[in-house]
Image: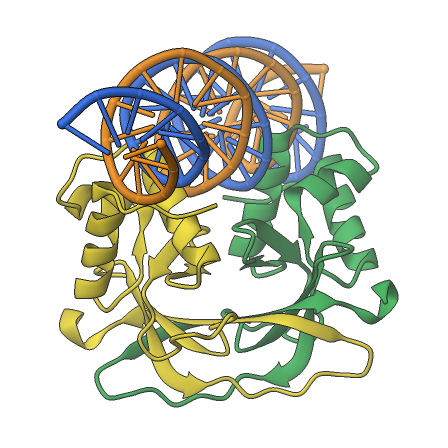
Chain colours: A green, B yellow, C blue, D orange
Amino acid sequence: MKRRKTPAKEAVLKLLSQRQKAMSHDAIEQEIEVDANRATIYRVLNQFCDDGIVHKVVAEDGKQYFAVCMDCKGEKIPNHHFHFRCTTCDTIECLGESVHFSIPEGYRVKDVNCLLSGTCPDCT
Amino acid sequence: MKRRKTPAKEAVLKLLSQRQKAMSHDAIEQEIEVDANRATIYRVLNQFCDDGIVHKVVAEDGKQYFAVCMDCKGEKIPNHHFHFRCTTCDTIECLGESVHFSIPEGYRVKDVNCLLSGTCPDCT
DNA sequence: AATATTAATGCGACTTTGTTGCAATAATAA
DNA sequence: TTATTATTGCAACAAAGTCGCATTAATATT
């Protein structure tokens, strides 16, 4: 399926690129420059995820956050480092720090999701 | 507010104690020995959380999982160690291993949520 | 043991987050 | 300029949780 360039896609990607942080659908819809339907935004975001342009983090609030992750460009599973969620400005950013762990015998790890939360420097 | 001993509470706590793992509301409702309304189960679980008897983990699927955590008994914020979610049997368990990290200046960490996922020994 | 107090329950309605089917629209290719 | 089909909007839907309110039932009181 070939991809087409559309206003919605451009706007979402622009917004996500400007912010360095992961945003919820909600925040994206509010701050985006174009009017776009909720479904459209989700579809655009999911497509970006599929294409590896954007990645998705699920926070302790159960919501999905999307970001153009700068540090982990290209990684298919970009969650092996810590993320930080600021509960004040409600965004998530990648921290450079990698996650280290060792697990007991018999466990097969397919995904790593490490999220710290609190307040970020901008909100202190 | 004083707490009362009710069938629903006993059943939930019994189930959660038998399993060593965190279960979703859904799983609890299915496996519980008593009939209980969805709202009731959630209220019971949340009350247990408030009382520090049970704790809650939110997984990458965005759902809440509840467990009587054996290792972190008494801890108010019991998430400073890794959790493991088995995507086959759909339960979460506490791994003993603690989470170590250092964060850049200016960040104030209030909560730690580290979840590995894959398949557990029982499901391999 | 009978009664009063109020925590706990069930029900239904509601919210939020996210997805999906379908017809209409609009990028791209021809 | 037209044909192709990716994308969009809309509405409906689904799942996870929460909440208000009247009813029920633990506990305390007499």
Residue A11: x percent and y percent?
78, 43
Residue B55: x percent and y percent?
41, 62
Residue D10: x percent and y percent?
60, 14
State the quadrant of the C terminus of chain A.
bottom right
Residue sitting at 23 percent across and 88 percent down? A105
Residue B44: x percent and y percent?
36, 45
Of residues D7 and B73, the one nearer the viewer is B73
Of residues B85 and A23, the one nearer the viewer is B85
Where on the picture, by quarter, is residue A91? bottom right
Of residues B39 and A33, the one nearer the viewer is B39
Is residue B119 toward the left or the right of residue A20 in the image? left
How many numbered callouts?
Answer: 0
Where on the picture, by quarter, is residue A3? top right
Residue sitting at 44 percent across and 57 percent down? B49
Question: Eyeballing the image, is A105 above or below D20?
Answer: below
Res. A95 visible in picture: yes
Question: Eyeballing the image, is B77 above or below B36?
Answer: below
Residue sitting at 36 percent across and 85 percent down? B96
Res. B63 visible in picture: no
Residue sitting at 28 percent across and 88 percent down? A104
Is residue B95 toward the left or the right of residue B121 in the image? right
Question: Eyeballing the image, is B81 above or below B117?
Answer: below
Of residues A106 and C16, the one nearer the viewer is C16
Is residue B98 toward the left or the right of residue B53 in the image? right
